[in-house]
Image (spheres, rainbow, N blue to C red):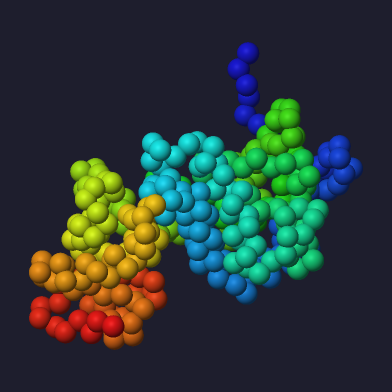
Amino acid sequence: MSRGRLVLQAPGEVCVNTLGGDHVLLAPEQDSEMTAVLDWLGHRDVAGLYTGAIANAIDYVLDGPRTGRYDLLGADVHPGEKASVGAKLEYEVLRSFSLPKEPPLDTLIAGVPVDIKATVGSNWSIPAEAHCRICICTQIQMGKSRHRSWLVRAHRSWLYRGAGNRDGKRGLAVHARDHWSVPLYDWTPLPVNPLTLLTTEQAARVLAQRPGQEPRLTMMFQFLEGHIIPRSVISTVGAGKHDPLRRARNVRASLERAGLTLLCGKFPQQRDLAAAHKITLGPEDWVALRMDGEHNGAG
């Protein structure tokens, strides 16, 4: 017998919640707690803060300075590690938004309990304690380097039927997400690790154990000419080695022989030179450029 399409109860009907008692399903605009949370979030750069939090969570899981890994979709990343991005993201979001870790869920926003959920797939596992509670649900698409988030009250009646897993977790019905949630922001780009732009052969050479750090860093800056290189990328190339940042500073002369000027955002004059080439360097960013004979202003 084929399974029919899941038909959900709509706002105005009664949600049968065996844990908290029956209650009326409310549309987001009728839900005073949803409105309070939305008002609080509306005064913040939610997309920007989530972008930084997700990037930090991914960097934490990859642990590039120790493992040399740089791509969450790489064959050297276990599926369980990919799934753990969501767990780490919770704490990064709390830190980014200056929110407390507060029961009964993950935090309190405007005095309202809120659960923070994320997935690198297509759905979220809503635990029993978050049924009929407000959740921020974030979807991360690593293959397209983007993310988006919704605010939703995860009514039990809007979760997929079935026993779920042993913890009572259930997925949020797509119809409920599309019709009875509030998008916090649309698809937003994630920072792309420059190492993922290398060819397979280039990556193998840059991340090899030999030669030493300086020749490999020189190759990296040459292969990625004009691309901003964050400090974390330099640490990944020098994974397990001593002081990769000092090694990066040491390759300036070899790059100059190849016609490239290495700029570091730590130095204001070098930031200005990069800006003149329409490149914005943060204080821990680097870039190798062809400067057409300009003085590099090295610090």
For this view, does 282 lie left or right of residue 23?
left
Q: Identify the residue at image location x=41%, y=42%.
A: 73
Residue 178 in percent (x, y) is at: 59, 48
Measured as percent of width and height from the top left, residue 292 is found at 10, 78
Q: Answer left or right for 246 relative to 216.
A: right
Query: The C terminus appears in which quarter of the rendering?
Result: bottom left
* Residue 100 seen: yes
Q: Quadrant of residue 169?
A: top right
Asked if 281 appears above or below 222 in the picture, the reply is below
Q: Is residue 243 above or below residue 82?
A: below
Q: Is residue 278 above or below residue 116?
A: below
Whole-percent x and y of residue 184?
58, 61
Residue 8 seen in this snapshot: no
Q: Residue at x 79, y 55 (%)?
A: 103
Q: Residue at x 10, y 69 (%)?
A: 257
Residue at (25%, 51%) from the top-left corner?
Answer: 206
Left or right, residue 174 beside residue 156? left
Return the residue nearer the eye: 96 or 113. Answer: 96
Q: Position of residue 205 (x, y in %)?
A: 22, 47
Closer to the camera in the image, 27 or 288: 288
Task: Pick whichever, 229 or 180, lies toward us.
Answer: 229
Q: Nearer the viewer, residue 140 or 94?
A: 94
Residue 125, above or below 42: above
Could you tell whether 268 is left or right of 165 in the image? left
All told, the count of numbered labels is 0
